[in-house]
Amino acid sequence: MKNYRFDEIQTTMSGNGLLRPLDVLLVGGTGTGKSTTLNALFGTTVAKVGRGVDPETQNIAAHQLHDFL
């Protein structure tokens, strides 16, 4: 995903000159790639990825990319 609509999204999020956080809810069935997607968005391993049919992520978790005050 090569910066798809990046400028438009950044402009919308910084409407009054202050960058606002963007909340995202990622849900789906077991083994559908939620952890893999999250890791790709963060650019690092923040969620353990399961192998095979055994689920890895069984609890709700919050991940924060930036510290917003």
Image (spheres, rainbow, N blue to C red):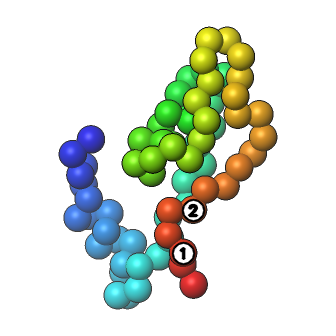
The reply to whether residue 33 is in sight is yes
Q: Residues within 10 Å of mark 1 (few under 14, many from 20)?
A: few
Q: Secondary structure at mark 1?
A: loop
> Type of residue at label 2?
Gln
Q: Which disc number belongs to residue 50?
A: none
The reply to whether residue 41 is in sight is no
**Would residue 26 be found to the left or right of residue 22 on screen?**
right
Q: Secondary structure at mark 2?
A: loop
As measured in the structure, the alpha-carbon distance from the residue carrying label 2 to the one carrying label 1 is 7 Å
Residue 50: percent from left, percent from top: 62, 24
Residue 51: percent from left, percent from top: 60, 18
Report the quarter where the N terminus lies: top left
42 above or below 57? below
Near-viewer residue (20 or 34): 34
Q: Which disc number belongs to residue 67?
A: 1
Report the quarter where the C terminus lies: bottom right
36 above or below 42? above
Residue 15: percent from left, percent from top: 36, 81
**Would residue 50 be found to the left or right of residue 37 on screen?**
right
> Type of residue at label 1?
Asp
Near-viewer residue (29 or 15): 29
Residue found 50% across the figure and 33% down from its top = 36
Image quadrant assignment for residue 26 = top right
Image quadrant assignment for residue 29 = top right
**Would residue 28 be found to the left or right of residue 9 on screen?**
right
Residue 31: percent from left, percent from top: 60, 20
Q: Which residue is mark 2?
A: 64
Q: Residues within 10 Å of mark 2 (few under 14, many from 20)?
A: few
